[in-house]
Amino acid sequence: MNKTLLFITSYPTRQCGIATFAQDLVNAMHKTFAGQLKIEICALLEPGVPVVYESPVRYTLNAHNAESCVEMAHTINANPDIDIVCIEHEFGLYGGDYGHHLLGLLSLLDKPFIVRFHTVLPNPDQKCLKTVSLIGALASKVTVMTQTSADILIGTYHLPAEKIVHIPHGTHAHIISDRETVKKRLGLQGKKVLSTFGLLSENKGLETGIRAMKKIAAQFPDAVYLILGKTHPTILAREGERYRERLQDLIKESGLENQVRFVNSYLTLENLLDYLAITDIYLFTSIDPDQAVSGTFVYAMSAGCPVIATSFVQAREMLDESCGFLIDFNNHEQLATAAIKLLGDDALRASMRKQAIEKTRPSIWENVALAHMAMYQDIQREKQVMMPNLPPVYLDHADRLTDEFGMIQFAKFDVPDPSSGYTLDDNARALITMCMYSKYFETNRYVLNLAHKYLNFIGFCQQPDFRFLNYVDVNHQFTGDNEGCNLEDSNGRAVWALGYLMSQYQHLPTSLVKQAYLYIRNCFTWIESLNSPRAIAFAIKGLHYYLQYERSRTVVGLLSKLATRLQKFYTNAHDDQWKWYEPCLTYGNAVLPEAMMMAWMITGKAAYKHIAEQSFEFLCSKTFRERYMKVINNRNWFHQHGVDHSSEGGEQPIEIAYTMFTLQTFYDATANAAYLEKMRIAFSWYLGNNHLRQVIYNPLTYGCYDGLETSSVNQNQGAESTVCYLMARLLMEQWNKQIYVASKNTEARPPLYLSLN
């Protein structure tokens, strides 16, 4: 699907909140669906302000002129390339009572269109009620950014609920770990920073923050209140800097010249996010109770700022005691009390910072772009979901998780947690990932350095009996966890990693291959004794790859014995309805049919292939929905005679990667293109094609979130999730090559993803 969207909106270089919102949304749509989507802008002109726009602005509109609105409708209708029109609505942007001129444009459009109401007045007069109701009746969909606004449109304006789509205001996932360095760069070292930002106007209520600072500064002399932003251009043109001058007089009268600072400029996004990142408390003091939404408010929360806000609509929906305080309008005493409490409690601010980030991560711009695309496709009744483009393959977060000893197990958000120690499991998977990277991209010293660390860690874990221990603490000592659990699966994963490394001997240094060869040869003394189904499967994979390096009857014999053992598991557990190796589906399921298919590829034994295909078809029937993949819930396994696994949540990135490995193996064995289509669907889980429609890959850190829960995403980005995402992303390199070959004889390549990096 290649679609053209036309946005009718204010747009930079015009300076207003809706212009910034529109630009951020358009940028997110371009980034997420580049090559599949064309976006054009019809920029709304400011009366009396001449301006020259550049791409993507194609049209301009004087929306305060009724004839211009009618003419624009005819222009849009005459352009066959425009598929959907998206209109950003705010009353002041359009001429006539309550923007009535917009109706002249909308009533003539013969294209489907969407209207986003940035403000929904809860107590409209008859003119407002009639205008908004008519706009909503004409639209294909109406979008709002708060649930309260949706409820008002239904209850007061009588719009049908099925027409209204709640998509939150987008946010930027911008977190700075070294806040003190940024404070120093901005001349704020050693200061406790309170801030607010936005275009200055009287409805911002900045007097409340200034008056509160007198009491705050008395208790915290190192506190500084930053007022970020220039005066609103419309206010500036009408009355100059009178409002700012009144604020400056108030500052002087209060003796706060050293505690309150203006940053009188229209900040770039980068500068703004830096200021927010070093803000200890964000103040939102608007005096407009009917304000529905504020980009400044959500940007501050997304940056991890504890917030003190007046009780406007969006604040009431998003802000609670976990991440900030609500205060009455114009109440500087309440603001001062709340700020003093926060400034005096570092632990409380840290907790609120974390909660604010978690509350806003579902609304990062990538997720908002996905929600908009789903809405567009729903309007046009598209059957095939348009998938986001493949992100570049970056190893930054994997490197961040790796120290000189190996890969650290867990992270708090994107910050590695050394106290969590290391595991053989993570380092084995990380080694496979580096080998895959060397296969698909040019081998370099950076990647080889990481591969050496992970291989050395595997060697460190190998014991005198040639088996492996799994858990290592921060002091590089084996922990007691190794004694209290079955380590067979971890040992199997080590064999898989060593075998895979050897299969890539053409892309890796000989020294690395020889080191892996020594480790895996020692494993032949115990591999045959494995009893865990997954350990057996991982070992079969490792032996399969080993045989690509060196043909060996001994290794083929070991592989055959293990496959026969796995076959017995299947024979004993399956029936006509339950075609599986065990009485429940738990974790890492896909590795079992993959191992059986690999056993067939080595031995040619038809029974292995039959079991592989039957069991994998059964697994896919439980995990693939029509348009997306649903991972087995790790809190509620799928039992043969028990609880259904269909409840949402408990989905982990590792399951997607393992399924994709199996799909690739099955395609290699059968050349059945249906496996390629399932690979595409499976990988799209990371990019938001899941029950929450939220991105699991973090495009800012290049890590991967640890899990998809019932209504949220686990924001930590540990080793397992990040490495498994990278495995899956690297498998899509092979997918790209295969889909290209499969489509060479067609007129055009399927517009699914961007070409190879």
Image (cartoon, rainbow, N blue to C red):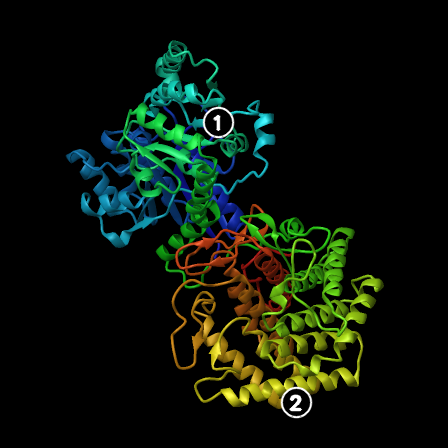
Left of 752 or right of it: where is 250? left
Q: CA distance from mark 2 to mark 1?
A: 70 Å
In front of the other: 116 or 347: 347
In front of the other: 503 or 678: 503
Where is residue 356 drawn, in percent x and y?
43, 42
Left of 43 or right of it: where is 117? left
Where is residue 505 drawn, in percent x and y?
79, 67
Name the residue beneath numbered marker 1.
Answer: 193
Query: Is residue 286 among the parts visible in the rendering?
Result: no
Q: Does the residue at mark 2 contact the one at mark 1 (Cβ under 8 Å)?
A: no
Name the residue beneath numbered marker 2.
Answer: 605
Q: Is disc 1 surrounded by few (<14), some (14 to 19) or many (20+) residues within 10 Å?
A: many
Query: Is residue 685 among the parts visible in the rendering?
Result: yes
On screen, 45 above or below 428? above
Where is residue 675 drawn, in percent x and y?
56, 73
The residue under the point 56% across, 64% down is: 654
| Label 2 vs label 1, nearer the camera | 1
Where is residue 27 drawn, in percent x and y?
50, 42
The residue under the point 29% across, 25% down is: 331
Q: Earlier in the sequence, mark 2 or mark 1?
A: 1
Quadrant of the image occupied by residue 383: bottom left
Q: Which mark is residue 647?
A: none
Quadrant of the image occupied by residue 380: bottom left
In front of the other: 273 or 32: 273
Quadrant of the image occupied by residue 349: top left
The residue under the point 54% across, 59% down is: 751
Total residue callouts:
2
Give, as a three-letter code, the residue at label 2. Answer: Lys
Left of 288 or right of it: where is 218? right
